[in-house]
Image (cartoon, grey):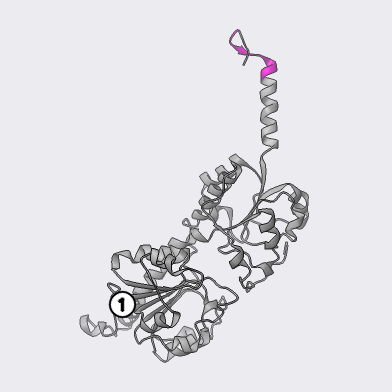
Amino acid sequence: MENVGGLVCLSQITRLKHLKRCINMNKKKLLLDPSFRTIEEIFHPDDLNRLHDCCDVLWGYDEPISMGEFESVKKDLWAIISPRWRYGDVKDIPNLKAFMEVGGRHPSPQDGLDYDYCFERGIRVLSCAPAFGPMVAEMALGMAIDAAREITLGHSLFQNGEEKYQRDGNKDTRTLYGKRVGLIGMGGLAHSVLNLLAPFGCKLSAFDPWRTESFIKSNNVTPDSLENILSHSDYIFVLAIPSTENKAVIDRSRLELIKKNTVFVLISRAHVVDFDALSDLLHEGRFKAAIDVFPEEPLPLNHKIRQAPNVILSAHRAGSIIGDSNAIGGLVADDIEAMAHGLPPWRMQPAQPEIVVKLPRRERINKPFS
């Protein structure tokens, strides 16, 4: 750089300003459209700043972008951050390289996203699901121990003056230490659960038709059939993601295999369980349960599960922790930075062709710009 009397030449300053303008103009365009979530919920300020540092962030409000505003920017978009696919035909977004969902699961093909086109064109479809793993696993473990040790039940009895002390209050309780634990599903959530189970020295088995036996064994877990897990486990954690093939796969006949006093933890999706049969068997006192997800939310006030004995109920709260949800933004910012520098994303969960074609339609279909 030329220097005259300690001052930078005006021509050099002019060129530097022009270069800076070119760099800003050449920043990749990113649509930040987080509704139904909020930006504050998803992003720590440091992670939001990282987005702005490497991309030209468009929209960036908690309200969903309107059709007119989207039409004015869609041809320039490099990436979209949103909890839902609500943007019409992906072919009309010619420069798109990534859709990063911040809702908790990949869009279903029936939601309008053309996965074949995405895979063909190298458009990455990424899910923030890994951000929820530790939160949901913690809740699953807490609810399992609560149900097994009858903590909530004991509290209710105490408030009603009906408490039973010491051994009399522990006739139907058990610890987690050394018990047989069955996992239904061996994805990311299962790994978070396994991390928390480590101190308890449990005998672990798992069923997951999407994983090889060698993969399951590599996690120090014994592969087993669904029937054996339901028949022999002291604790059962339902961690499977929904698919078109596993709707109510844990049906009445399989639920009837569960032993007396076993704790059945339903923490991923109610989709995989015959919920009416589950409700009936709990009313019969066949086993214990801890449930955070339901086939319909909000759950009708007259649903019979509400009065079932030996069950801990939670209103889909396992993954909605204020503050901890900023983990979503950390994943997003890490992968945006990587892709902006020509590197592959490594934090979010990529959609796989073999799996997305089997994703079920969402209960609440998302219409574009509704």
Where is residue 171? Give x, y as percent: 26, 85
Q: How dense is the environment of label 1, judged by Cα within 10 Å: few (below 14), some, or many (20 and up)?
A: some
Which residue is found at the position 51% from the left and 85% from the top?
251
**Up-down: is 315 above or below 65?**
below
- Please give the residue where the numbered disc 1 appears in the rendered image: 149
Q: Determine the image quadrant of residue 92.
A: bottom right
* Picture layout, residue 155 above or below residue 304: above
| Residue lying farthest to the front in this orientation | 214
- Point out residue 280 in the picture as x, y percentages from the top left corner: 47, 90
Quarter of the figure that contains the C terminus: bottom right
Q: At x 50% / y 74%, what residue is drawn?
A: 293
Q: Is residue 347 among the parts visible in the rendering? A: yes
The quadrant in which the N terminus is found is top right
Is 6 a magenta residue?
A: yes
In percent of width and height, residue 134 lies at: 43, 61
Is disc 1 placed on a helix, strand or loop? helix
Residue occupying image coordinates x 60% and y 43%: 342
Give the amino acid at mark 1. Arg
> In the rendered image, which quarter is residue 207 located in?
bottom left
The image quarter containing residue 201 is bottom left
**Residue 86 shows up from this direction:** no
What are the residue bounds of the magenta stretch?
Answer: 5-12
